Amino acid sequence: MAVLVNATRDKVIARNVVRANSEVERTVGFLRKSRVGDDDGIWFPRCNLIHTIGMRARIDVVFVDDAARVLRVVNAAPPWRILSGGSRASHAIELAPGIVERSGLALGDLLVLDDGA
């Protein structure tokens, strides 16, 4: 687990973030959850397109570039959608619905995934 921090605003966004490196982690994501906890998140490296097909919960989605600067935010994305961060997006982050707004996250903010190493 890692902590997702908004380095621009010096604020923790989520404390239980998994880096989805394996195919299983990338495929399953939050599919099994009927509710995403406020501190839960998944960081999808090398990903500029995600889907919520088959999900039972809404999620916030953040797309960042190579430097982890926020390019696009989707608030409370409903199930059965395909979402793109655009050609400049390098990573996608799935979070609980409402977390983006409550954390004050904005376009251009720098995010850090701190695994304590």
Image (tube, rainbow, N blue to C red):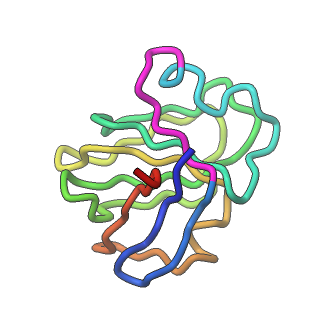
Magenta highlight on residue 56: no
Q: For this view, does 59 lie left or right of residue 90? A: right
Asked where in the image residue 113 lies, by quadrant, the reply is bottom left
Pick whichever, 84 or 34, lies toward us. 34
Q: Is residue 42 above or below residue 6?
A: above
Q: Is residue 35 above or below residue 97?
A: above
Asked where in the image residue 76 lies, by quadrant, the reply is bottom right
Q: Quadrant of the N terminus?
A: top right
Magenta highlight on residue 18: yes
Q: Residue furthest right?
A: 34
What residue appears at the point 82 percent right and 36 percent down from the top-left corner?
34
What residue appears at the point 56 percent right and 48 percent down from the top-left corner?
17
Q: Is residue 112 above or below residue 27?
A: below
Q: Position of residue 82 (x, y in %)?
A: 47, 34
Pick whichever, 34 or 39, lies toward us. 39
What residue appears at the point 52 percent right and 80 percent down from the top-left corner?
104
Q: In this picture, which residue range is highlighted in magenta?
A: 16-24
Q: Residue furthest front?
A: 117
What residue appears at the point 44 percent right and 34 percent down from the top-left corner?
50
Q: For this view, does 27 lie left or right of residue 106? A: right
Q: For this view, does 80 lie left or right of residue 19? A: right
Pick whichever, 39 or 62, lies toward us. 39
Q: Is residue 51 above or below residue 76?
A: above
Q: Position of residue 51 (x, y in %)?
A: 50, 32
Pick whichever, 4 or 32, lies toward us. 4
Q: How many marks?
A: 0
Q: For this view, does 90 lie left or right of residue 21? A: left
